[in-house]
């Protein structure tokens, strides 16, 4: 277990009794005392940071790749993808030259596939506009597809020593707790409050390490549910610790519940092929493959089709019709309930929709498919 005992003589006040109301948090909150935040944090980081593969290099391509992968993904999972990606695309021009289908296939399982499409498109932009050299100007970095305020600050600070705070979920939590901020961190006001605090304390000599140290603290001692303040280098000056408020901060505005969406897929097999659909660019899972989707005529409900419905759709009476129990798949704003209807066609489907094609089972492993479709394909292969 990592234990860091602070010894810089920071001022310590007795914790006050815990209470749940925001008002009581506000009353207890005191401005953090003058405190060598960056210095204490960087000392701790130098001593305890994890040895992660992307930290071995300041190459913007590698840092960019890791930052995109780490969004919405745990570090342990991202490491495998990071190595696989670098093996397939060792340099930015290699990524730019690759077909999008290959990029999506390698991304499969990480979710949020727009990240992969944007990564690929941005590599093309770098080739086209910057002769294959990743730009070092913050304005130019922000013009690349899929690179927003956070990612540009991370790349700018780590690779080009720009003193820009990279505010991710970990930074929101650490800074909100340290300063006792009660403004909800998932609002623009909360984001601004954290950003301005970080702008004040970022170390201009080591801005990249500073940003990574804040994230490291959030991924370690300053965990969301069970913060381990006794391991934290900021403990003596932390408002949340001093007021026993770490379990109440950060404050978050409640999110809207996800919208339920019913989907019914037709898994139609003909000989050693399955009929697969390539999704359009304006849909979720854009550019990936799924199956033809069954939608009832009123467009609202998706009752499961029977053999007569499939006969009418394909012009062929199906055999061996079987229906799976629905599975649930969560997206950011949607909860999908997905049913699969399996059937065999005794002959080829003559005129499937334009986006549907018969694909050989032994080619399935080359297709980029979303997680629920991969799950279904595994069952088909079994
Ligand atoms: S003292 Fe505790 S709450 Fe404060 S920053 Fe450190 S780990 Fe987080």
Image (cartoon, rainbow, N blue to C red):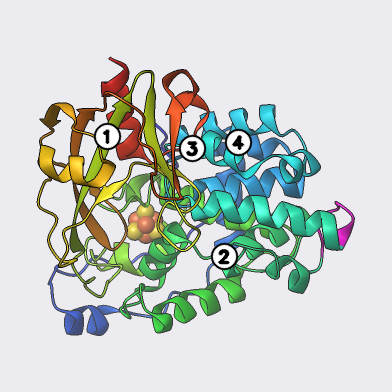
Query: Which mark is on residue 107?
Result: none
- Image x and y of residue 104, in percent: 54, 41
Residue 358 visible, this angle: yes
Q: CA distance from mark 4 to mark 2?
A: 27 Å
Q: Residue furthest right?
A: 131
Q: Main secondary structure of the magenta part?
A: loop
Marks 2, 1: nearer the viewer: 1
Mark 2 or mark 1, which has the lower sequence index? 2
Q: CA distance from mark 1 to mark 3?
A: 17 Å
Query: Which mark is on residue 267?
Result: 1
Query: Which mark is on residue 102?
Result: 4
The N terminus lies in quadrant: top left
**Residue linked to disc 3:** 368
Graded by Cα atoms within 10 Å as few (under 14), some (14 to 19) or many (20 or more), the crowding at tag 3 reads: many
Q: Are marks 1 and 3 in contact (CB under 8 Å)?
A: no
Label 2 CB, ligand 1: below 8 Å? no
Q: CA distance from mark 4 to mark 3?
A: 7 Å
Q: Quadrant of residue 135?
A: bottom right
The quarter of the picture showing ligand 1? bottom left
Q: CA distance from mark 2 to mark 1?
A: 41 Å
Residue 134 visible, this angle: no
Residue at the (15%, 66%) spot, across then down:
300
Marks 1, 3: nearer the viewer: 1
**Drawn side of residue 74 relative to residue 124, left or right:** left
Q: Which residues are magenta?
A: 130-136
- Image x and y of residue 55, in percent: 66, 39
Query: Which mark is on residue 150?
Result: 2
């Amino acid at each position: 277990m990592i234990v860091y005992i602070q010894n810089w003589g920071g001022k310590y006040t007795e914790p006050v009794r815990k209470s749940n109301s925001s008002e009581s948090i506000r009353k207890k909150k005191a401005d953090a005392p003058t405190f060598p935040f960056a210095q204490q944090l960087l000392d701790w980081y130098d001593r305890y940071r994890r040895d992660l593969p992307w930290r071995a290099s300041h190459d913007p391509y590698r840092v960019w790749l890791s930052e995109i992968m780490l969004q919405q993904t745990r570090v342990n999972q991202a490491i495998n993808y990071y190595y696989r990606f670098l093996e397939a695309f060792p340099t930015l021009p290699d990524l730019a030259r690759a077909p999008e289908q290959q990029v999506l296939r390698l991304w499969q399982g990480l979710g949020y596939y727009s990240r992969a499409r944007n990564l690929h498109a941005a590599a093309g932009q770098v080739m086209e506009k910057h002769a294959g050299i990743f730009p070092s100007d913050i304005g130019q970095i922000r013009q690349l597809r899929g690179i927003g305020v956070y990612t540009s600050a991370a790349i700018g600070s780590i690779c080009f020593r720009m003193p820009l705070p990279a505010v991710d979920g970990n930074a929101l939590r650490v800074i909100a707790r340290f300063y006792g901020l009660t403004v909800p961190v998932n609002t623009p006001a909360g984001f601004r409050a954290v950003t301005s605090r970080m702008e004040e304390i970022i170390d201009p000599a080591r801005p990249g390490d500073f940003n990574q140290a804040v994230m490291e603290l959030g991924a370690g001692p300053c965990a969301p549910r069970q913060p381990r303040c006794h391991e934290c280098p900021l403990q003596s000056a932390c408002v949340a610790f001093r007021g026993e408020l770490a379990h109440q901060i950060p404050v978050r505005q409640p999110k809207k519940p996800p919208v339920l969406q019913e989907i019914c897929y037709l898994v139609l097999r003909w000989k050693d092929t399955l009929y697969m659909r390539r999704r359009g660019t304006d849909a979720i899972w854009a550019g990936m493959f799924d199956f033809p989707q069954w939608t009832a005529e009123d467009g609202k409900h998706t009752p499961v089709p029977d053999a007569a419905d499939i006969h009418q759709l394909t012009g062929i009476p199906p055999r061996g019709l079987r229906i799976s129990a629905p599975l649930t798949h969560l997206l950011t704003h949607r909860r999908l309930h997905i049913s699969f209807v399996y059937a065999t066609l005794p002959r080829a489907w003559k005129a499937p929709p334009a986006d549907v094609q018969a694909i050989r089972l032994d080619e399935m492993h080359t297709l980029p498919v979303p997680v629920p479709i991969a799950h279904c394909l595994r069952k088909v292969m079994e």
